[in-house]
Every structure is written in C-alpha cells, then in structure tokens.
Amino acid sequence: MAKPYAWGRILWGVIWVAVAILVAVCVPATKRSIDIIVTVFSILAGFLIAICMMVGDPTRLPGTDWKDAELHRDTLLGPLFRFRSLFYLYLVILLAAVVHALFDGRTGMILGHDPTWWTGWIEPVFLGLAVLAFGLSFSFPGALYTLQREGIDREIAQRRKTQGLSP
C-alpha cells in the first residue's frame, strides 16, 4: 500500500517557494541583511543538530524486540531525512554568504566574469534560499512537541504495563 501524500506539508513548501522567489526578485541584499541571515542560520543549524539527536535516538523505537524496532524504523528515519535536507539547505545558504563575501568589492575577472556578475546572481539565490529555509524551519516546534508527546505517551504506557493495566 502506497503512503499517502502529506498535502499540508507539500502546500506549505509550495507557499514558501513562492515567497522565496518573490523576495529573491524584489528585495536587494545588503551587508547587514547578509550578516543577520548568517547569524540566524548558524544558530538554526546548531538547533537542528540538537533536534536530530533527539529525534534519531534509538531508544525512541517502540517495543522490546528487533521486529518492533524494524517495523517502526521509518517513523524515525522520515523526520531525520527532512531535517538532514534542511541542514544541507542551511549549509548552502552559509556557503552562498561566504562566496558573496569573497566576490563583493573585488576587481578583476573571476573565472571570466566581472565580480558584479557573480554577486548579481548570488544575492537573489541567497535571499530566496534563506526565506525558503526559514519558512521550512517552522516545522521545528511541531517536531519537538511530537517528540515530547510520544515520549510521555510511551512512559505512561510503560507505567500502566508495569502496574498490570492495559495500555
């Protein structure tokens, strides 16, 4: 049986792609905005690593035998895949900021192009990706809530089981 599509998640991504394109086309990058974006995404990258460590904790696998763990592997790997992809997006944004800083204000040709040509296409891509990644980062609070709720539910079920009650 095929997994159903997460239409809400897909719609959320499409909306943020549209907003990112709009910002990339209409908003110029300034040194201050680039500094702010680098700071924000550096912090978000560290926060994302902490979330990945909690979400991917093998002790979160339900059940006591390997068969239960095998059946629930995808429930842990799905969010980890999304968070890993978002982390790579953060790294691309930080790389674009570094490239922009290297080319900004330089004179002379760089790989056959004027430095303003490089910064001219890096800026909108950088801003667009930053807006997209920021929008996709709104999944963090929900992921943390789900993580904690599942841990609480599992603990309650375990306590009920030790007291001889049905979960």
Image (cartoon, rainbow, N blue to C red):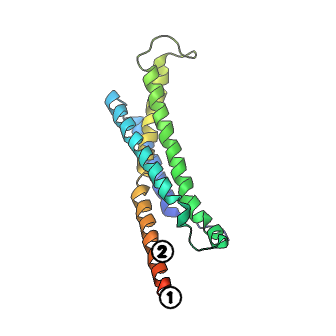
Q: CA distance from mark 2 to mark 1?
A: 13 Å
Task: Measuring from the top left, give residue 145's x and y in whole percent.
Answer: 40, 64
**In the rendered structure, which amino acid carries the disc numbered 2?**
Arg
Residue beneath the point at 57% across and 54% down: 81
Amino acid carrying mark 1 in the image:
Ser
Q: Name the residue located 50 percent from the left edge and 39 percent from the top edge.
A: 91
Question: 8 above or below 65?
Answer: above
Quarter of the image holding residue 20? top left
Q: Is residue 135 left or right of residue 80?
A: left
Cβ atoms under marks 2 and 1 closer than 8 Å: no
Asked if residue 125 shows in the view, the reply is no
Q: Residues within 10 Å of mark 1 (few under 14, many from 20)?
A: few
Q: Can you identify the residue that label 1 sits on?
A: 166
Determine whether, in the image, residue 32 is placed left or right of residue 49.
Answer: left
Q: Which residue is at 61% across, 64% downward?
A: 73
Q: Indicate which disc residue 154 carries.
A: 2
Front residue (pair 110, 156): 156
N-term mark: 2 or 1:
2
Is residue 56 toward the left or the right of residue 34 in the image?
Answer: right
* Left or right of 87, for residue 148: left
Q: What SS does tag 2 mark?
A: helix
- Quadrant containing the N terminus is bottom right
Nearest the eye: 117 or 97: 97
Residue 28: percent from the left, percent from the top?
37, 31
Q: Residue at x 41, y 45 (%)?
A: 44
The residue tagged with tag 1: helix, strand or loop?
loop
Graded by Cα atoms within 10 Å as few (under 14), some (14 to 19) or many (20 or more), the crowding at tag 2 reads some
- Residue 12 location (% of width, % of height): 46, 56
Is residue 31 at least partly visible in the picture? yes
Q: Position of residue 167 (x, y in %)?
A: 49, 84
